[in-house]
Amino acid sequence: MTDSTLYCYVHPTRPTLLRCNNCERPICVSCAVRTPTGYRCKECVRGQQKIFDTAQWYDYVIVFFTGAVLSAIASLITVMISSFILWIFILGLGPLAGVIMANIARRFVKNRRSNLLNVVFVLGIVAGTLPMLFVLGLGTFFVMLAAGGDVMSNIFTLSPLLWQFVYLVTAVPAAYSQFSGIFIRR
């Protein structure tokens, strides 16, 4: 009887029963990547992912500035809402703004995709909020210095700054999931 034991093509000392469903090479459990169509080797998965990376170099610039400008506008709206004591609306504004920003950015780049493009978009959103955070943070610092030990005025002064963080925490995940195409289903 002949020895028909297969060995991983990456780890020649590991016996295996698995094969890549694309290139048919034997792969061990640590080299196998589970896909919706079965197990594949890491090389085949990498080759498949390159097909879906369609972003051009200028898409990164477009997405960053789109995220930054739209986030700056949403950040300004957040300050206006928080100054009118309508704080509860910010909890809905963040995810809504994130979805709107993602759809606009996706149209600007004509649905081209890349994993790095998703990250650049989120960095643009955070960068667009930074000027407002800086202004509010600096203003809060000076007001707190002037107020001294009055706790109630310090809490009221911190409110717009805290709502900016609430906006960021709610908008960024919504924007990322919408822009990257992640859908949560049962």
Image: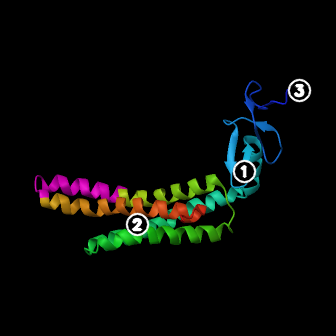
- The magenta region covers 134-151
Residue 102 x %, y % = 55, 67
Is residue 22 left or right of 146 when viewed as pictured?
A: right
Q: Are marks 2 and 1 in contact (CB under 8 Å)?
A: no
* Mark number, residue 86: none
- In the structure shown, which secondary structural element does the residue marked by tag 2 occupy? helix
Q: Nearer the viewer, mark 3 or mark 2?
A: 3
Q: Residues within 10 Å of mark 3 (few under 14, many from 20)?
A: few
Q: Main secondary structure of the magenta part?
A: helix
| Most distant residue in the left direction | 149
* Mark number, residue 2: 3
Q: Nearer the viewer, residue 117 or 177?
A: 177
- In the structure shown, which secondary structural element does the residue marked by tag 3 occupy? loop
| Residue type of the residue flagged with mark 3 | Thr
Residue appearing at x 51%, y 66% in the figure: 69
Cα–Cα span, label 2 and label 1: 45 Å
* Mark number, residue 75: 2
Residue appearing at x 70%, y 41% in the figure: 32
Residue appearing at x 75%, y 24% in the figure: 13
| Most distant residue in the front direction | 1
Q: Quadrant of residue 147?
A: bottom left
Where does label 1 land, which residue? 38
Q: Nearer the viewer, residue 63 or 89?
A: 89
Is residue 15 left or right of 94 when viewed as pictured?
A: right
Q: Nearer the viewer, mark 3 or mark 1?
A: 3
- In the structure shown, which secondary structural element does the residue marked by tag 1 occupy? strand
Is residue 141 highlighted in magenta?
A: yes
Q: Is residue 67 above or below residue 14?
A: below
| Residue type of the residue flagged with mark 2 | Ser
